[in-house]
Amino acid sequence: MSDAPVRVLVVDDSAVIRQLLSSMLARDPGIRVVGTAADPLIARHKIQRLRPDVLTLDIEMPRMSGLEFLEQLMREDPLPVVMVSSLTERGATATLQALSLGAVDVIAKPKATAMEEFERSATELAARVRQAARARVQARPAAVFQPAPSGSAAAGFAPAVAPRGRSPSSRLVAIGASAGGTEAIRQVLGAMPADAPPIVITQHIPATFSRPFIERLDRHSALRVLEAVDGAPVLPGHAYLPPPERHLGVVRHREGWRCAVIDAGPVNRHRPSVDVLFDAVARHAGADAIGVLLTGMGSDGARGLRAMRDAGAATLVQDEASSVVWGMPGAAVRLDAADEVVPLHEVAARVLALS
């Protein structure tokens, strides 16, 4: 990217929120708010005239919903979109749908609170927008994903076949992701058979969206996808994600592995952190593990994946061409943490082949 400021168009039906977001973004010299829009129809004209690099988009707006607008935008004139969502169950469900339609990232709708909180929110928003500007977005037909029939793989993804003569549960699989990861993980799990190896996952996601995300994965996979409970066994045919605002690790038990839910501060600015998961898997599973680092901003997980490789684990990262953001996978490659760099559609098959 050039050194030119990231050009942002703010779309929200609330004048207060438009002003608040604009003032937050204006604090960053690397960002320029080129305009605002009160609804998608106004936004459509301003996109054509102003050619922003990134859009911040509300979900509930007059004349056309943010989801309808996003679907059209990603089909006709795609650009990186950061969803600005209310922290409600309804907002969480809609936001997950927005991510499936091609939005790069999501951030909670800010509030005009104390200055310290304002500055923290402004810094986070600016970081998300700057990183979104680097995202790879492509025109694509809109897809509204329907729940898979009970006991079947997700619609649209054929389950991969486990290699003959090998138990699919012989290794523990650890997956990490951030921006773009909600759909990448859905695709990987959707391609897994019901007797797949046990899987532990860390995805950077706001706390309010964590449980709806887990429920969505469970609907679209032949696996049983669960929120991890501290001390619970890690079983074949199951995938585990941490509770909101908790890290996930594992510990070795005489009968296999158990979940370790960790109440600790952020690591690499994230809670949950991929490095926390990968470090635990390196210590407690060693060569009996497979590490997978998918699309995501920043470098969380790169160091942990290197620890897994040093401990004898097989390690995979998603390739740049299929990643929304090749931040975390790219950082792992630079650390020589990856045995293989593979496109997203091959990840499930490679994991099964290595199991």
Image (cartoon, rainbow, N blue to C red):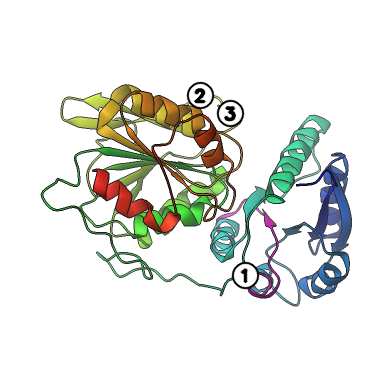
Give the labeled residue for mark 3.
268
Q: Residues within 10 Å of mark 3 (few under 14, many from 20)?
A: some
What residue do we see at 42% from left, 39% from top? 242
Which dot, 2 or 1, sits closer to the camera?
Answer: 1
Q: Secondary structure at mark 3?
A: loop
Which residue is at a point 24% across and 38% down the rendered structure image? Answer: 171
Horizontal side of residue 40 vs 241, given as left or right: right
Residue 239 position, x and y percent, is 32, 46
Q: Secondary structure at mark 1?
A: loop
Q: Amino acid at mark 2?
A: Ala
Q: Is residue 79 magenta?
A: yes
Q: CA distance from mark 3 to mark 2?
A: 12 Å
Residue 138 image point, x, y percent: 62, 65
Q: What amino acid is labelled 1 in the image?
A: Ala
Image height of 57 relative to 319, above or below: below
Res 276 quadrant in image: top left
The residue shown at (75%, 59%) is 55
Q: Nearer the viewer, mark 3 or mark 1?
A: 1
Tell me, yes or no, whether the highlighted magenta stretch contains residue 49.
no
The amino acid type of the residue labelled 3 equals Asn
275 or 16: nearer the viewer? 275
Q: Residue 53 at what x, y percent from top left? A: 78, 57
Along the line of sight, the residue nearer the viewer: 138 or 263: 138
Bounds of the magenta span? 71-89
Residue that numbered label 2 is attached to:
264
In the picture as drawn, the residue positioned furthest to the left comes out as 165
Q: Residues within 10 Å of mark 2 (few under 14, many from 20)?
A: few
Q: Quadrant of the C terminus?
A: top left
Gap between marks 3 and 1 measured at Cα: 32 Å
Q: Read off the residue under disc 1.
A: 139
> Is residue 280 in view from this perspective?
no
Q: Residue 103's spot in the image, x, y percent?
A: 62, 59
